[in-house]
């Protein structure tokens, strides 16, 4: 929804960023004319949800409701008066054509304005007002218009749930949280959190040397790559189980850590596809994550030194819900997106990853499968698969040339540009 222009003497306050200095631009794309006016009229907007502490309407970083309210007050006072004057003029025209006051009173404002515009001599194009943004697409709410209140979510929890889910409330990216909030309260997830609590994951700041990645990084993928900006999903198995390797992005390691063998093979495949690529000495894939590549492991934690040790504890069910969220809303806020998911690229390497994408619509998404890049299997179909170029070819056709991923630029010092915890 495009923000109303503020008066010269007042300026809209900057949105709050908790950790990082850089902010993702707010989505302002008009996604077309209202189709389902009844649903639109009942959909709350920023002003309607003024009682909430958080009202998360797009993929910008954590947005305080106070800032939202101040922006609304600073930017809408004069335009509201103008809109009211324009509506009075339209009512007088409508009355000339026989519209009754009773009928007007019972009709939602958005529908009434549309009806007036269509009944005026020049039709809808005669009015100066722009068609309202569509808030549902084929019955699915547009991502950036789905409100979210973190405080309301927390108030709905039992005391034990508040304790167990504090990590999610502190570190989970809000663009994902508003879609997955109900998942957190399901019995399987609470059971998973009880298990992790016993393993030592008891808050983002409490050290837990027996489990990787560190608690604060378990959901790093959700902050680096907001849901509406997802272009590509790379699905891994579980985090690296060596010290200081895993940091919440599959296949990626922190700067200063040796590049793992699987990632070396990924670099080799990029080099085969793009001969000018110079494989970096580091293994940080943060640059990809910032550009819309969701780096998602199927299991989000692992016990130190024990690969697969947290499998079948509940993470698989949760990450399946993440994939379903991408199916619905991945790419929703890309430049040529329409507010809901039009499709993304899934790179599923190995049988573990292939199972995660088996139920997706191949007509909607580009689903590329092959052997895993591990040294044990890379020569059985990963090397030479051409997936990085195929992904970009599909993205260019679907969303335009600007949507292609720069696979060859990997900045060792990149910081997260997405949603901040």
Image: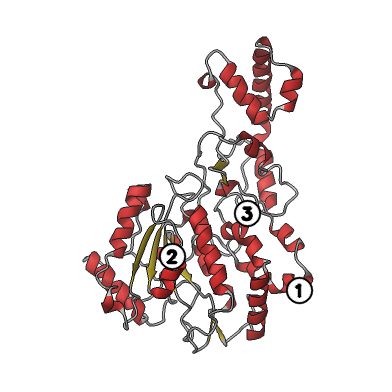
Q: Nearer the viewer, mark 2 or mark 3?
A: 2
Residue 50 image offset from top left, x and y in percent: 73, 46
Specify whether residue 203 is in view: no
Residue in the image at 57% along x and 57% along y = 175
On screen, residue 65 versus residue 114, left or right, reads right
**Which residue is label 2 attached to?**
358
Q: Nearer the viewer, residue 195 or 19?
A: 195
Q: CA distance from mark 3 to mark 1?
A: 27 Å
Query: In the orientation shown, which residue stands out farthest toward the right?
Result: 159
**Which residue is label 3 attached to?**
63
Residue in the image at 36% along x and 76% along y = 282
- The numbered mark, 3 or 1, whose residue comes first in the sequence reads 3
Assign the N terminus to one quadrant of the image: top right
Label 1 element class: helix
Q: Nearer the viewer, residue 141 or 199?
A: 141
Specify whether residue 147 is in view: yes
Q: Which mark is residue 160?
A: 1
Label 2 element class: loop
Residue in the image at 62% along x and 44% along y = 12
Residue 240 image offset from top left, x and y in percent: 46, 81
Q: Is residue 332 above or below residue 379?
A: above
- The numbered mark, 2 or 1, whose residue comes first in the sequence reads 1
């Amino acid at each position: 929804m495009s923000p109303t222009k503020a008066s010269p003497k007042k300026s809209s306050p900057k949105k709050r960023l908790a950790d990082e200095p850089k902010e993702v631009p707010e989505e302002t794309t008009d996604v077309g004319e209202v189709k389902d006016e009844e649903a639109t009229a009942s959909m709350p907007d920023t002003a309607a949800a003024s009682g909430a502490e958080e009202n998360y309407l797009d993929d910008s970083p954590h947005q305080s409701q106070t800032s939202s309210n101040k922006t609304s007050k600073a930017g809408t006072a004069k335009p509201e008066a103008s809109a009211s004057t324009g509506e009075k003029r339209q009512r007088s025209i409508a009355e000339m054509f026989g519209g009754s006051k009773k009928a007007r009173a019972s009709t939602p404002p958005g529908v009434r304005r549309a009806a007036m515009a269509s009944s005026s001599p020049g039709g809808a194009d005669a009015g100066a007002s722009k068609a309202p943004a569509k808030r549902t697409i084929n019955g699915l709410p547009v991502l950036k218009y789905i409100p979210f209140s973190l405080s309301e979510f927390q108030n709905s929890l039992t005391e034990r749930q508040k304790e167990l889910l504090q990590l999610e409330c502190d570190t989970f990216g809000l663009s994902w949280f508003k879609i997955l909030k109900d998942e957190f309260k399901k019995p399987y997830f609470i059971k998973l959190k009880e298990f992790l609590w016993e393993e030592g994951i008891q808050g983002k700041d409490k050290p837990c040397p027996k489990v990787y990645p560190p608690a604060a990084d378990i959901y790093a993928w959700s902050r680096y790559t907001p849901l509406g900006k997802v272009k590509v999903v790379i699905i891994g198995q579980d985090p690296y189980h060596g010290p200081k390797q895993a940091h919440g992005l599959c296949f990626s390691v922190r700067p200063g850590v040796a590049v793992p063998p699987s990632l070396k093979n990924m670099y080799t495949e990029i080099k085969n596809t793009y001969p000018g690529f110079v494989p970096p000495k580091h293994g940080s894939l943060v640059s990809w994550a910032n550009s819309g590549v969701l780096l998602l492991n199927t299991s989000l934690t692992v016990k130190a030194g024990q690969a697969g040790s947290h499998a079948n504890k509940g993470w698989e069910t949760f990450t399946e819900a993440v994939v379903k969220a991408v199916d619905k809303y991945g790419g929703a806020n890309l430049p040529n997106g329409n507010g809901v998911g039009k499709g993304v690229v899934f790179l599923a390497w190995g049988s573990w990853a292939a199972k995660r994408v088996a139920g997706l619509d191949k007509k909607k998404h580009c689903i590329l499968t092959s052997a895993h890049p591990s040294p044990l299997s890379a020569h059985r179909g990963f090397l030479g698969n051409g997936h990085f170029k195929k992904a970009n070819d599909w993205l260019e056709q679907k969303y335009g040339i600007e949507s292609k991923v720069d696979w060859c630029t990997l900045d060792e010092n990149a910081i997260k540009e997405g949603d901040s915890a």
